[in-house]
Amino acid sequence: MRRRILTALVGAVIAALLAVGVVTVVLVRLAAYDTTVEHLENSATTLAAVIGDSVAEDAHVLLTRGRMQRLSASLGVENIGVVLAMPHSNMPARVLAELPEGLTVPDLDLEVLAATGNSSGRASENAWAAATFAPRDAPGPTIIVVVSSGLIAPIGPAGTWFLFAAAVTLVGAAAIALRLSRNLARPLVEATAATRKIAAGELDTRLPEPPADSHDEHAELARAVNAMAESLERSRGLERQFLLSVSHDLRTPMTSIQGYAEALSDGTIDDASRAGGVILDEAHRLDRLIHDLLDLARLDSRRFNLDLHSADVGAATEKAATAFEPEASGREVRLVVRTPGDPATARIDSDRWGQVVGNLIENALRHAAGRVDIEVTSTPGQVNLSVADDGPGIASEDLPHVFERLYVSKRKPAGHESGSGLGLAIVRELVQAMGGSVSAESLSGRGAKLVVTIPSDS
């Protein structure tokens, strides 16, 4: 990239210098042409007056080659030609002194000369000018004097200064382009190095944080790379936390199952029915965890279908909440369900909605001190479900991450299963698949409220 920027900038400067040089040369040549023509016109007028009437009497003496050369040198012109023309006559013009090279009598445009007394033009690389002289007293032939000269276009010292200035400009442009290319490419080089480190597993790699008031492309790139690194580092932390949590959740019931199974096998336990109940409960815990893992895998791969149909959200919520009354009683927690008097209909998958409500209630039961409130309300265009507990609430650092997969709150409920961070993530995925949204509210020490909002069907 640095090479391309350097080449582009230096190339642009060279192109600009060439354009300026070409335009300068053209303007100088145009100015030189005008200057040369003006000089030639004055010389032609002077020569026409000098030659005057005497050319008719002694043309061969006056117009000898030697005299023409001396006149040319004295007037600073290269060639002098003389033509004798008879106005208002069909007689052809007579050339008394050879016209400049590349110029013929028709090129002089005798009609214009007769009308204006002078004319000018260009022949090959030379400019020419012609002037007339006619006798005043008696009608006679018109003397036409033609002079020519090469274009005077000396650039002189200006050309030397222009070349010097061009060289200095090129050197300066190269230095500026080199510095600018380094400054422009450095953030990209740093970003490339940082992303390679991140890809290699160094997730604590960060780019220098740009100033808060800087919003150019480089600043936005640095912020994006840092945000990506933070997200990856946090995801790795969540993954590690998830594995530890799942390992714990798997090991605890497996230990209980193994212990009671060995006791039953050895015959060292008196209450076989109680041992079977413990084994069954722990097996149910394992089954729920495995189902959560499978559900999350299906949600990730979008390999699940929703049977969306119009249903009463209040009735579906009451049905799902009823199944948790025994568990709530065992934990000495009161479930309170409130639904609107009129049906609150929405397009939902009833089975998946039951899973949403169940996961929200399970989460609330783990944290509740003695009460869980489940309420369905209907507002224009939407149906809301809220599940609130009277527990310690959600810590401020946990609140933005409640529905993230694999996230486990730092404030673990005492005396209950801590959970693996899958239930609420599944809630969010299912609700979004039904076209809704989820949010969390909390007041420290006054419990937490999780809210689900879906579009109504009315």
Image: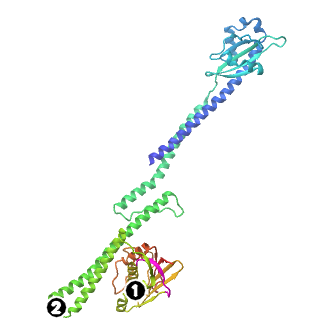
Tell me: residue 389, above or below residue 152. Answer: below
Q: Residue at x 28, y 80 (%)?
A: 286
Q: Callout 1, which amino acid?
A: Lys
Q: Is residue 261 left or right of residue 162?
A: left
Q: Residue at x 45, y 82 (%)?
A: 313
Q: Callout 2, which amino acid?
A: Thr
- The residue mark sitting in front, 1 or 2, is 1
Q: Is residue 30 left or right of residue 279?
A: right
Give the label on residue 268, or none. 2
Q: Is residue 32 magenta?
A: no
* Residue 322 in sight here: yes
Residue 456, percent from left and from top: 49, 78
Give the residue at mark 1.
319
Name the residue nearer the viewer: 297 or 354: 354
Q: Secondary structure at mark 1?
A: helix
Residue 396, percent from left and from top: 46, 78
Q: Residue at x 25, y 86 (%)?
A: 280
Q: Magenta segment range?
A: 340-349
Question: Quadrant of residue 147 in the image?
Answer: top right
Tell me the CA gap for discs 1 and 2.
42 Å
Residue 64, percent from left and from top: 69, 7
Residue 291, percent from left and from top: 31, 77
Q: Is residue 341 magenta?
A: yes
